[in-house]
Image (spheres, coloured by chain):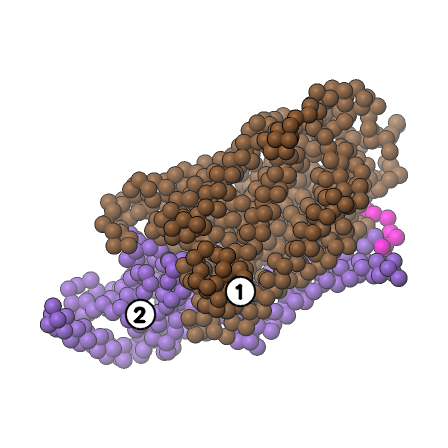
Amino acid sequence: MFKRFANWMPGFWALLFLLVPIGGVATFVAAPYFDIWLPRDVSEHGHVIDGLFMFILYLTGIVFIVTELVLFYFMWKYSSKKTAAPVAYSHGSHSLEVVWTIIPAVTLLFIAIYQMDAWAASKMRAPEIPPTVEVTGRQFNWDFRYPGKDGELYTHDDVVRTDGKLYLPYGKEVLLKITSADVLHSFFLPNMRMKQDVVPGMEQSMWFKATAGGSYDIVCAELCGWGHYKMKGEVTFLPPDEFDAKLQELRSDADTMTVEVAETD
Amino acid sequence: MSTVPVDSAAASAGHAEHAHAGGFLRTYVFSLDHKIIGLQFLFSTLIWFIVGGLLALGVRWQLAYPWRPMPILGELVAQTEGGQIAPEVYTMLVTMHASVMIFFVIIPVLAGAFGNYLIPLMIGADDMAFPTLNMLSYWFMWPAFLAMGASFFVEGGASQGGWTAYPPFALTQGTGQALWLVGLTMVGISSMMGSVNYLTTIIQMRAPGMTMFRLPMTIWGMFITAVLQAFALPVLTAAGFMQMADLQLGTGFFIPDGWSANNAAAQSGGGQPLLWQHLFWFYSHPAVYIMILPAMGMVSDMLSCFARKPLFGYKPMVYSIAGIAGLGFVVWGHHMFVSGMNPALGMTFMVSTMMIALPSAIKTFNWLGTIWRGNLQFTTPMLFSLSFVSMFIIGGLSGIFMAATPVDIFIHDTYYIVAHFHYVLFAGTAMAVLGAIYFWFPKMFGRMMNDSWGKVHFFLSFVLMNCVFFPMHILGMQGFPRRLADPYHYGTFRHLLPLNQFMSWCAFLLVGVQIIFVINFFWSMFFGPRAGRNPWHANGLEWQAPSPPGHGNFDFQPMIYRGPYEYNSPEVDEDYYPQTQPPAEGAPAPPEAGH
């Protein structure tokens, strides 16, 4: 009885390892039905990054399935309890080594070179336009500085908002300047596929073009203190004309605020 | 079995002088014997493994039931109120879980425990080259243990700066951060003493006939690891001193101009926060390989032994390890793709990082080649080794996503990263270490561990571990960020709560089932069946020594005739051919390993 059970075990272990590729693929297949996937993309460049992600997912997925199945098959076939075939007294194969060195090397190099343009577009080719908004991360809030009546950032009439709500136009390129007032933060817009660490003493830039309206999360993605989890903001994309109107509104808010502050002092 | 050369009597007489008896303190506490020191490392790291695991439970509790008081364990964590995990406590748990697991468990268990125990035995030396230095390398861990342990109880608690301790935030931490830095420096000193010793021992003290290309892969893993440590550690130690100076002496290596925190006066600064990241990762990326190469070596040895077949592609395996080590020094920037580092550098680091996946792929294919047409024996250590291969495939492939810079923009600092390194470090290294304990336990204690309970332990760990870590990939796809005390503060992540609860329960069970291992370990130590010298019929030199080996290791003068992977050799009738067994009269010269 016990012996028969022991004879079944090698098959059992092989099947357990077969669960790895099955479970792995099932997880990714089932995820969208539970509304778990890449979040909605509302940027012009985001589909490139998503495309690269999916390309690597399929490529590594195939390698994953094949190697795990090979592992399963060898475990199934070459178990000492099941096979009477003599062991292959082999120390390796030079030609196989060459094959499985060159094929991954070429593939990996291809992936690396294939990505370069997307990287350069996202991080190296800043558009030559005046900055739309300055973003400042501080424990534990995102502050936004908009241009005042003169329409230029970094002048005396700039408007600073500390309510964590960012307004940007969609359908046109925007350029953000990002700084930190205290420690490291990371300005993460999941729906724009954009992330930039915020470093005190350094000015970072981020640029993108939103393609749709609506409000989306701003997430702090770098550990910045006990309140890191609540360093949440919201970005709202408006049509360009509504954005201009919103700027006007923010400016008049700022004017009122200035008067109130003067009185209470 | 004629594995003991004829002149063993004379040889053992030569070794008799080593077998001096000492008092309890000299024998078990301040021992110079590499085996005792290895076991000291093993027990210390296993205790910290439990501490690190419990810290992880706090993290998982908060992710499953945010702000709900944690039963039982919550009370134990310093500074919780009624077991509720406050956000600063959560940040501390995350920081200390990682710090403990990396600096007190994975690195010392590989290099300290197995490196110490196995190197002299596997190369045929009677001890390390510098026994006193070896003892100090263990005792320098204690200031680190005490500093980090004490930091839980000082005002402000243990560090909340993340295990990467990025300034300037880390500099806003008080005593906890200072103690963390002391701990880090002491671990570094200990590792440095160890690596100098391992390098010298492996180069100088190999037994006659033990050429470099007859070394087992375990030793190659330890050797390359020691090289990595020797060259990368000084940078981390220097960086640690610099951060300590910033923290305590008012310097500004990592502080920008005019910076101030907590409403203190602005500092003169003049430094750069990114400098720390460069220095830190210049060590800590090679450290990733320090945390996996010895495990790869041990897995290679176990796979070959239980496949009863020579290791496939010995030399390519050695060259891959060397390749990983070489490239390991030029990939650190991939931790900093979105840090604000010059994006042009991102491109070079992307290429080097993609290339480092290549030796890992070669190793995986060679492991598959090793079990191909073998005669697989599914013992507990074999199952752990096979699971290492299966899990390393996942951890290796998911690394390609983050090596691709545009994709990394999105997944950086999300759970995709958490999934990746847990597949490499837990599902990979930690499982390999458990397998290695089952494998070398008979040598260490002279008794076998219970195989059936070992398999139960393996089965439960394997299933639960995948339930904890695999879903992290899809969490990461959603953009679920790391290190958030309450991710559900974001409405967009609220639907991930049930999945996180499932993962947390699997994590609780995963920690719980390790009790099977603990009981098996201690029970077998005293009551397990006696093992004999070579219970697995393995080829390695260590299996020719008595179990456990006495002071001086060998009761004969080891003489090496071949590599350690001659299983099912046509030259002998048995399916194994120990490294010390002289070739039969008139037999053809043994083939050199690695063709």
Q: In front of the other: label 2 or label 1?
A: 1
Which disc, if any, is residue B71? 1
Q: Are marks 2 and 1 on the same chain?
A: no
Q: Position of residue B564 (x, y in %)?
A: 74, 37
Residue located at (77% from left, 51% from top): B451
| Amino acid at circle 2 | Gly
Chain letter, brown in picture: B
Residue B72 visible in rendering:
yes
| Amino acid at circle 1 | Pro
Is B507 part of what is drawn in magenta?
Answer: no
Q: Colour of chain A?
A: purple
Callout 2–callout 1 Cβ contact below 8 Å: no
According to the image, label 2 marks what residue? Answer: A164
Which disc, if any, is residue B289? none
Q: Is residue B318 left or right of residue A148?
A: right
Q: Which region shows up in magenta?
A: A81-88
Q: Is residue B353 left or right of residue B154?
A: right
Q: Is residue B404 left or right of residue A239?
A: right
Residue located at (76% from left, 42% from top): B447
Residue B321 visible in rendering:
no
